[in-house]
Amino acid sequence: MIFVLDIGNSDVTAGLWHEASWKQIWRLPTDTNLPQGFYVARLRDLFLEFGYKMDHLQAVVISSVVPEITDRIKQAIFQLSEKEPVVLGAALYKKLPIGILNPNQIGSDLVSNALAAYELFNSKCVVVDFGTALTFTTVSANGEIIGVSIVPGLKTAIKALTQNTAQLFEVPLVVPASVLGKDTTHAIQAGVLHGYEGLVRTMLQKIKTELNEPQLKVVATGGLSSILPALKDEFTIINRELTLDGLRLVLKYA
């Protein structure tokens, strides 16, 4: 069994890979105030609940964009399994079959996405990751990350809007039929969700134009990758576990 963890800004996505498939996908809170003991107890409980044993793990791989809790989770895993996790970072990038742009700046989740997408297509492609940030990671035909674009994610945009205004509030992420809002909830949903639909289409068109690749393959991933159904035709494939797939592939090169 292989255990991988993607420590993101909003949550920790953990996947258990066994016999060529993901047996479990779990989400834990990302909170810098939580002690190591929380992660020890939560991981132990999850493995026990689903009938798995952490001491049967063959390997553990971590990607993290929240350095404050990386060591806590590493130590929690070692305490439970006596396995030293492989942490995807600049020291490991040089072993991967992809070229890394600014290795000390790029997020390891984006590297994992690029690795998984390149292994999937073995050609030019772009990964659209719908997370706390909405990212576009473009990979060349020979596996180099040639550029990244970052904008606030859908939830982040709504949160920023409501936190910086007196009379607006958070709303469910439901795409309304009309862009003409009839009340506050509808107005925010129309503006953000239909607006982001246009944002994604425009960004993909600009990337394809700049690369002169009208048939560029596009992978959508992230927890909100299916939230905008009108974008379905823009994507070659939707794979919510793409980041986790990249992390398990890291073991081939670690």
Image (cartoon, grey):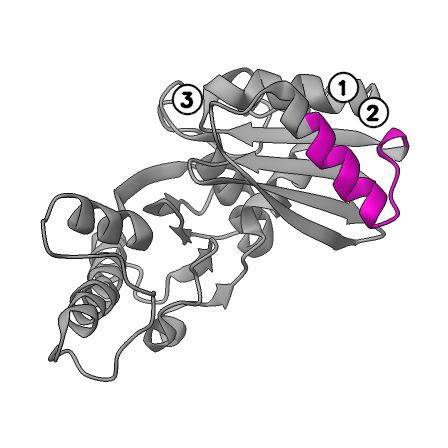
Q: Which residues are magenta?
A: 40-55
Q: Is residue 246 left or right of residue 217?
A: right
Instruction: Check disc 1 and give the amino acid type.
Output: Phe
Q: Secondary structure at mark 2?
A: helix
Q: Is residue 53 left or right of residue 196?
A: right
Q: Which residue is mark 1?
A: 78
Q: Nearer the viewer, mark 3 or mark 2?
A: 2
Instruction: Check disc 2 and give the amino acid type.
Output: Ser
Label 1 vs label 2: CA separation?
5 Å
Whether residue 250 is visible, yes or no, is yes
Q: Which residue is mark 2?
A: 81
Could you tell me which quadrant the N terminus lies in?
Answer: top right
Q: Are marks 1 and 2 in contact (CB under 8 Å)?
A: yes
Whether residue 143 is visible, yes or no, is no
Which mark is on residue 97?
none
Is 152 above or below relative to 220?
Answer: above
Give the quadrant of residue 189: bottom left
Label 3 vs label 2: CA separation?
30 Å
